[in-house]
Image: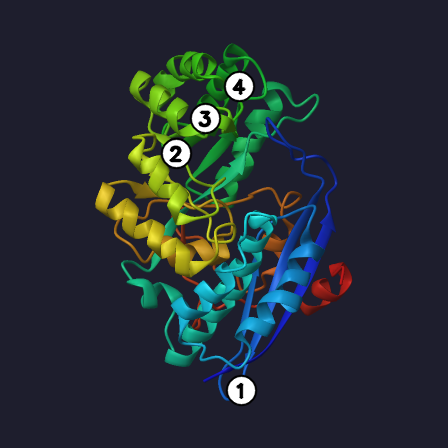
Amino acid sequence: MRIHSIEAIAIDIPLERNFGGSTYDVLKRSTVITRLRTDDGPDGLVYNGDNRAHGLEITSIITDELAPLIVGEDVFATERLWQRMFALSTTQRDRKLLLEAIACVDCAIWDVLGKASDRTVSALLGGYRGEVPLISIGGYYVEGKGADGIRAEMELYRDLGVAGCKFKVGGLSPEADAERVRIARVAAGPDFLLAVDANCGWTVADAVRFARLVEPYDIAWFEEPCHWYDDATMMAQVRRATSIPINAGQSEITSHAIRRLLAAGAVDYVNYDASEGGGVTDWRRAAALCATAGVAMTHHEESQIAQHLISAIPHGAYIECFGDPARDPVWHRMWTNRPPLVDGCMPLSPGAGFGIELDGDMISRFRTN
């Protein structure tokens, strides 16, 4: 079965308000839809990522650079295809965009492999369980939100049926953010998972001060506590100073970088994102590294992909979504066959491959190429 053609579609959906964290703004929901056609078998259909500035560049890389390298090749030759695409990652180009483009194509290839064998991608990767706990990303800094807004947000997520919330911190002082977390914990209740995510917002001293303030609130993990430039060393220091587990990996684009975090003793969880780091093929290398190191895995966003990855392995823990419909119209409306939650868990999508079905009218309305 050979690859016949590849189509990449950039999607941009404006949002009604800013959903930013400590170090960034979010004014639209963006993604890339990839259709990979084979000459005598099933087609792949996936969507990947949330790059709000470079969707058109990613689609151009897919159609102009990656497709010519792999069209006509055996779709089952995943490692050879991946290495052929990765060979473009020279030092003089934007490697992050290239890896995002590779991820789109690689995930579409794995969708085809699942459909060709009538198995889910989860089954192809190990099939450890049929569902995985889902949490919502939240706690955004919104002007005028206040304590009542935090309480209402926690109620929204509980009503949605997710297992917990990953709450944004790192944009205020450690004391001010600790108070926001206290309000969230009281509002959510003791049976609701609550993690915190600083998005690389703090120094070691501020991260440690914050961690000690929120330790009484049963925090599941503290994600990306420290500034990017020496994050592995700094996170290791924070990890030694707190009882709260440390989570990182979403900012990395290769499994080699995950090895760096593990070697530094910086993490208890790794949330490497297959849509940022070259797709399923490289994600499973990172998963193997984490398994041998005894480190659990979560996944940054993209639950339409992540549900298959995290459910496939015994050290898989949680996947994520944006529970607020205003933050993610793709997850809430474009993904038309998203499985309903059961006791805080997302069952695997029905059907082979990734099993993704999308709203064609929304694609036509919001495509930018």
* Mark sitting on residue 230: 3
Location of residue 287 in the rendering, given as x and y in whole percent from the top left corner: 32, 51
Q: Earlier in the sequence, mark 2 or mark 4?
A: 4
Spatial separation of the CA atoms under disc 3 and disc 4: 27 Å
Spatial separation of the CA atoms under disc 2 and disc 4: 20 Å
Label 3 sits on a secondary structure element that is helix
Residue located at (47% from left, 58% from top): 279
Mark in front: 1 vs 3: 3
Spatial separation of the CA atoms under disc 2 and disc 3: 15 Å
* Mark sitting on residue 180: 4
Quadrant in the rendering for residue 307:
bottom left
Q: Which three-letter amino acid code belongs to the residue tagged 3?
A: Asp
Mark in front: 1 vs 2: 1
**Vertically, is 344 above or below 129?**
above
User: Position of 62 compared to 314: left or right?
Assistant: right
Label 1 sits on a secondary structure element that is loop
Mark in front: 4 vs 1: 1
